[in-house]
Amino acid sequence: MKRVRLTFVGLAVGLALIAPVAAGVAFPDAPPPTGLRVPVPEFGRVLTAQLERPPGTIARFVGHQGRDRDLLVILLFELRAYPYVAPPELAYLVSRCTAMGELDPRGMGGGVIPGGDWRTDPELQYLALDAQPSCQSVR
């Protein structure tokens, strides 16, 4: 009986260690934006840490939005918590006035998108307003 319990515990630990790797394969990242020097998974790790998600949460990069005139960059992610069966939570990292190649995930703001629609999220709509301060006034 003790041997059966140990086998079950070993299988459970093995699955817990393999699940994040398997989820990364099952839910691959979208191609990164041109010019991004930091690997996309690093942005995802910083995002999950900023949002204080549980261990084993993966952040899948799904796309980006941007605007050249003020270097607005919004990196869009799906967050999936272990055991990866619940619907994903949508989240983002955002930066203005920093070139794509100089983005550092630790210096970006971020948040969760309640309701799960990037196009109607009030925070993202606010960030994209033309009335935002110029980059010169931000620096």
Image: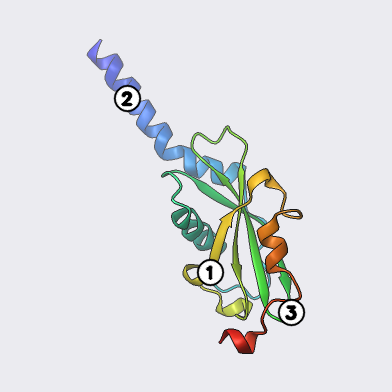
Q: Amino acid at mark 2?
A: Val
Task: Tell me if mark 1 has few (under 14), some (14-19) or many (20+) residues whose alpha carbon lies within 10 angstroms of its own.
Answer: many
Q: In this rendering, would 19 be left or right of 75?
A: left
Q: Residue at x 59, y 78 (%)?
A: 101
In front of the other: 54 or 125: 125
Q: Which residue is mark 3?
A: 68
Residues at badges 3 and 2 in contact (C-beta under 8 Å)?
A: no
Judged left or right of residue 83, residue 66 is right
Pointers 3 and 1 in contact (C-beta within 8 Å)? no
Of the pair 109 and 48, the residue shown nearer to us: 109
Asked if the residue under mark 1 is in contact with the one under mark 2, i.e. CB atoms within 8 Å, the reply is no
Question: Which secondary structure, mark 3?
Answer: loop
Amino acid at circle 1:
Met
- Asked if residue 130 is positioned above or below residue 65 in the image, the reply reads below
Q: Position of residue 118 (x, y in %)?
A: 72, 54
Q: Is residue 63 above or below residue 37?
A: above
The mark tally for this picture is 3
Q: Image quadrant of residue 70?
A: bottom right
Give left or right: position of 47 versus 77: left
> Residue at (65%, 65%) from the top-left corner?
74
Please name the residue shown 43% across and 44% down the image. 54
Q: Residue at x 61, y 41 (%)?
A: 88
Q: Earlier in the sequence, mark 3 or mark 2?
A: 2
Question: Which residue has dot 2 on it?
Answer: 9
Mark toward the viewer: 2 or 1: 1
> CA–CA distance between discs 3 and 2?
53 Å
